[in-house]
Image: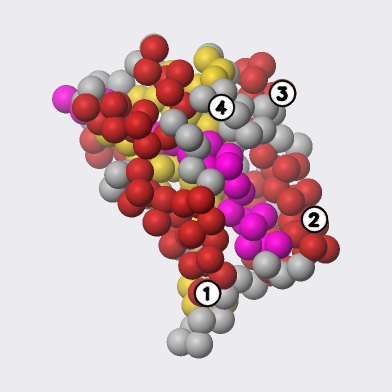
Amino acid sequence: MTKLICFDCDSTLSAIEGIDELARLRGPEVGARIEAMTNEAMDGKISVEAVFGRRLQIIEPRREHVAAIGQLYLKTIEPTAKSTIAELVARGWTPVIVSGGFRPVIAPLAAELGIARIEAVDLYFDEAGGYRGFDEAYPTTRSGGKPEVIQRLQRELSPARTVMVGDGASDLEAQPFVDLFVGFGRYVARPKVEAGAQRFIRSLDQLLAFL
């Protein structure tokens, strides 16, 4: 019987926040504005849905921007992520990325880490690569979305155990629905997450000691 381990992506498997990096491609003012909105949501000060669509409206990312940030994820992989995930798979864990980020941006990172399944938000583009919107119905576009995705995975996979690892308030929301929630603080140690998490680590290889 499989064991399920769900990883947040941004500031967990990678040092960056993809949405913030997409914004920086639009210039420093847009970058600073979007980063502030992201931090408010990840710190739990405002809801995810309060900023999700608005950030994309401001940025209007193009397909080539998605490709560029996909490569940036590869350059900023958490140093122990690849070896840790390989060891977890060897121990019978099934890794899944559960993210409020964007599936096409995350895909290169997932492939590099050997993670076959990405639960994240789709982006839509026109034939010329211009932004056409996002999957507004996807659960991780709103607060409470990650628990919803995890419960769906549990129904599908019937895991013997479920673990969630992440840095943000949206990740911490999953704690009542998993056997173990592990807060992550290598890149951003958010006080609400550090205080509330059952475990808190600053390097992904620390997972191996208690999984």
Residue with the mark numbered 1: 64
**Disc number for residue 105:** none
Q: Which residue is label 4 attached to?
A: 184
Does dot 2 land on a helix, a strand or a loop?
helix
Where is mark 2, residue-wise? Answer: 32
How has the structure been colored for display?
secondary structure
Kindly identify the amino acid type of the residue bearing the numbered disc 1. Glu
Task: Name which of mark 1 and mark 2 comes first in the sequence.
Answer: 2
In the displayed structure, does residue 58 sit left or right of residue 124?
right
Q: Earlier in the sequence, mark 2 or mark 3?
A: 2
Q: Which residues are magenta?
A: 1-24
Q: Could you say whether the residue bearing mark 4 is in a helix, strand or loop?
A: strand
The answer to whether marks 1 and 2 mark residues whose Cβ atoms lie closer than 8 Å is no
Amino acid found under the numbered disc labelled 4: Phe
Picture coordinates of residue 153, whole percent (x, y): 32, 38
Q: Secondary structure at mark 3?
A: helix
The Cα atoms of the two marked residues, 4 and 2, are separated by 24 Å
- Say which residue appears at 64% left-offset and 47% top-offset: 48
| Amino acid at pointer 3 | Pro
Instruction: Give whichever of 154, 8 is nearer the camera.
Output: 8
Residue at 56% across, 23% down? 202
Q: CA distance from mark 1 to mark 2?
A: 21 Å
Tell me if I can see residue 134 in this picture. no
Residue 9: percent from left, percent from top: 49, 43
Image location (x, y in percent) of residue 137? 49, 58
Mark 4 and mark 1 lie on one chain; the one further toward the N terminus is: 1
Q: Nearer the viewer, mark 4 or mark 3?
A: 4
Residue 22 vs 40, above or below: the answer is below
State the residue position of label 3: 191
